[in-house]
Structure formats: structure tokens, C-alpha cells
Amino acid sequence: MTVIEKAQGFALTQALNYISGSPEKNLPKLLELIEIIGGKSFESRARAFHAVLDDPDGNWYRYIMNLWRDIDGDVLKATLRNFGLYASIIGAKKQEENVKKLGCNIPYAILLDPTSACNLKCKGCWAAEYGAGLNLTYDELESVIGQANELGTQFFLFSGGEPLIRKADIIRLCEAHPNCQFAAFTNGTLIDEAFAGEMLRVKNFIPAISVEGLEADTDFRRGSGTFRKVERAMGLLREKRLPFGISCCYTSRNTEYIGSEEYFDQMIAWGAKFCWFFTYMPVGRDAVPELMATAEQRAYMYGQVRKFRETKPLFTLDFWNDGEYAEGCIAGGRRYLHVNANGDFEPCAFIHYSDSNLREKTLLEGLRSPLFMAYHDRQPFNDNHLRPCPLLDNPGALTAMVEASGAHSTDLQNPEDVRELSAKCKHAAKRWGTAADALWGKSCCAGCRDGDLLMKKDA
């Protein structure tokens, strides 16, 4: 990190100290400082923030003020500095420059699997199929983070397996990289008083806890008693004023409840500050295709998430249905990539194919590999950005890239032929294609009225 970037971080921290006394009054001054640092690349986001701050009765104004009330002050300052400044402004600028200079995708975030081990065995989960007891060493994790920093990436998420089996190394990485933002997709059962204390100490780690609904649906997939352990973990984090979110997989079994107002209100009551929605993917030998959400259920989630974004103080992301904002698929390093516990560079957490491994190639070499360059050259995979995925939404697109690049299945125990995997998604893709095309037409018309979406599509 350069001297100028460190100075910008110090200035932001000082501004946050000043603002904390009266965020309602002083937040516009913070925004002015961020606009100076961000320059032209921040202009569109700055307009959006100004609109929020100019509407004290609005939902997002209420959300921002709740952050100051509900989160430990020092943790909030570290999050705003690391995620808001270093990852999303300074880092994003470097990423854009390197995309042009290096001619390949550069990720905004990297998903790392410290281990394939897990203390649960969830129905339909592929994690155990990577192989028993796979682990990345601390030095390997450290190396990937350091290489990523050089390219401009400052945001890292852990998954697995259960990443908190390696909680000591995760905390050590947080300490070693105080200007990076770390998060983890976790089942939450290993969060205890001691770990919460470590989170308060390092300040730059946020868990996203997997919850499938209430007790019956969560325990159905994750095992009896899991829900109660998760509730205790969320209660502890809320008591310590530590930020956390929820990672929620909607399936044919639970979608109606997951998308209900009751459930959104429940997540807010638990203390969650964000929710990351995923739809079930039939990946791996133990996949349960019957759990895939129907086209009607996916359309239902599309509508519910957008409705509650305007009315509920909860930040939500939908990994598939938000393709319209990301202009298609975000995998293959375009916004993120996945490094599994065997060290394989994978385009996505749901795409278990690779032609590169961190023990043989650098991160940049992985991003320039045939498989990742195929992603770079072919994105977006559909002009309808509500159909972003080369597997779930566009069967055949992934098959072509895997076969052309010579990539192999990274499932060590039961390698899955890409054609067989794609075949599982054909029916769902056809049904969703009809629904998505209808939604895209409506979305485009709404966007065309203000010119925003039209410009995105023309680009």
C-alpha cells in the first residue's frame, strides 16, 4: 500500500472519529471526503449516497443510522475503511487499470477454502467430495492474499468445508492484513465467546451465517439441533455489537418462506445486517436435483428481494437474480474467483473445474489460463442478464469452455463429467429462460425510462 493510500485511510479514520458523535449531522461531510478520494469513478455511487442522505425518512437512511447504533464503533470504522475505501475505491481503481494493462479479468473479491473438513454433513452439499482432509497451508493462503493485493484485490471470503475449523489461521490472516476486509460463509456452530472476542480485537472479519429458514428447514438440510446452535451464535454476536450477515440457499422446499416478509423481519430481528441469497445448484454426486427452485420460485424471489430492498433495513444480494446490476456472470475473475482446499483456481464456487493450481502457477497465471480467459472472452453469456450463469442458465456454455480449455473436474473422489452436470440443468434453464425473458423485458422498459439500463445493455 502506497504512502498516499495510507494517508487517505488515516484521513478517513479521523473523519469517522469526528462523525461518530453525530452521524445524522456529519455524514454528508464524510461523503465529501470520499468523493475527493474516489474522483470520477465514484461519481455515480456518490449521487446514490446523496439521495439516501437527503431522505431522512427513507429505508436506507434508517439502515445507515442503525449501523452506528448497533455495531461496535471501532469495528464499524475498520469496515468502512477497509471495505468502503481500500476494497471498493482504491482497490477498484487498481483492478480497472490492471484489466486494461494485463488483458484479463482481475477480481474484486476472492473466495478461499482453508479446508474441506466440516463438522456438519448438509443434504446436497458437495464440499466433502473434494477429498478427505484437504487444506491450504497458512503460507499458501498468505501468498494468494499478497498476490491479490498487488493486483488491487482487498476483499477476501472464506468457505469450505467449514472455514472456522481453521479459525486460528483466519484470525492470524486478519492480523497480518489489517487493511483488508475478510468475511466467511460459515454454518455458525463454531462461533463462541472466545472467537467473538478475537473478532472484536482484529475488527476486520465478518461472518455470513448459513440459515435455511427456521428450525425445521435448517435442520432438514444441516442436521438436528443446528438451528439452535446458530441462534445462540447470532445472539452472541448481537450482544457483542459485531456485524454479521446471513447466507441463505433457497430451494424447492423453502423458497416461499425464505422470500416472505415474515422471514425478512426475522433476519432483522436476529441482528443481521445483510443477506446473501443463493439458489440450490445440483453439483456433485450427492446432489438432489429435486431441491432446485422452480422458475416460478426464482421469479418470486426476484420480486420479493426488490420489494423489500425499498422497505426493510437489510442489505440483500441475490447471486443469480442480481445479474442485471452486475451485467451478467461475475465469475472467472470478472468480479470474483474461487480457490478450493486443494489449491485449484476455479471460476466459481459452483463450477468445479480447473486448469490451474496455486502450487504450480501464480494467481495472475491462473487468471490468464485458458479456462479463465474463456470466461473473460465470452462474458456475458446471455444478453438477458437475468440469465447470467454458464451452467444453470445457459447449458452448453460451460461445457464449451471446459472442453476447449482442457480443464478437469476438481472433485477428487467422484469426478463429474461437465456434460452430465449440464444435463441436470437443461430443464430448469428452459423454464427459467421463458420467465427471465418476460422479467427482462419489464426491467428494460423501466430502466429505459431513466436511460440507465439502456446504456448498460448498449455497452
Image (cartoon, rainbow, N blue to C red):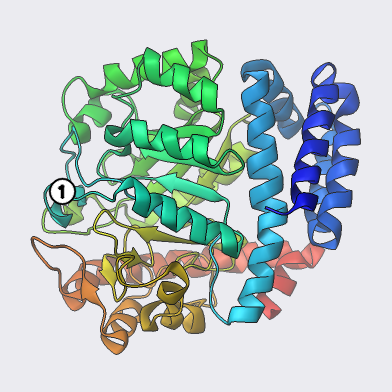
Farthest residue toward the left? 413
Relative image position of residue 347 (x, y in whole percent): 38, 67
**Mark 1 nearby-residue class (10 Å; few <14, some 14–19, many ≥20):** many
306 vs 282: above or below = above
Asked if one can make out residue 311 in the rendered structure from this viewpoint, the answer is no
Q: At which x and y percent is residue 331?
A: 45, 65
* Residue 160 x, y percent position in the rendering: 29, 45
Mark 1 falls on what kind of element?
A: helix
Name the residue type under label 1: Ala
Q: Nearer the viewer, residue 284 or 146?
A: 146
Drawn side of residue 295 relative to residue 24, left or right: left
- Asked if residue 177 lies left or right of residue 30, the reply is left
Q: Residue drawn at (36%, 37%), measured in percent from left and top?
A: 169
User: Label 1 belongs to which residue?
Assistant: 128
* Residue located at (84% from left, 51% from top): 37
Number of labelled discs?
1
Q: Quadrant of the C terminus?
A: bottom right
Residue at 47%, 72% (x, y): give it.
364
Name the foreground residue: 420 vs 153. 153
Vertical position of residue 212 compared to residue 455: above or below: above
Residue 52 lies in quadrant: top right
Which residue reaches farthest top? 239
Work out whether residue 207 or residue 263 is closer to the camera in this orientation and state it.
207
Q: Is residue 180 above or below residue 42?
A: above
Where is residue 365 drawn, in percent x and y?
Answer: 43, 76
Figure quadrant of residue 350: bottom left
Is residue 297 rendered to the left or right of residue 43?
left
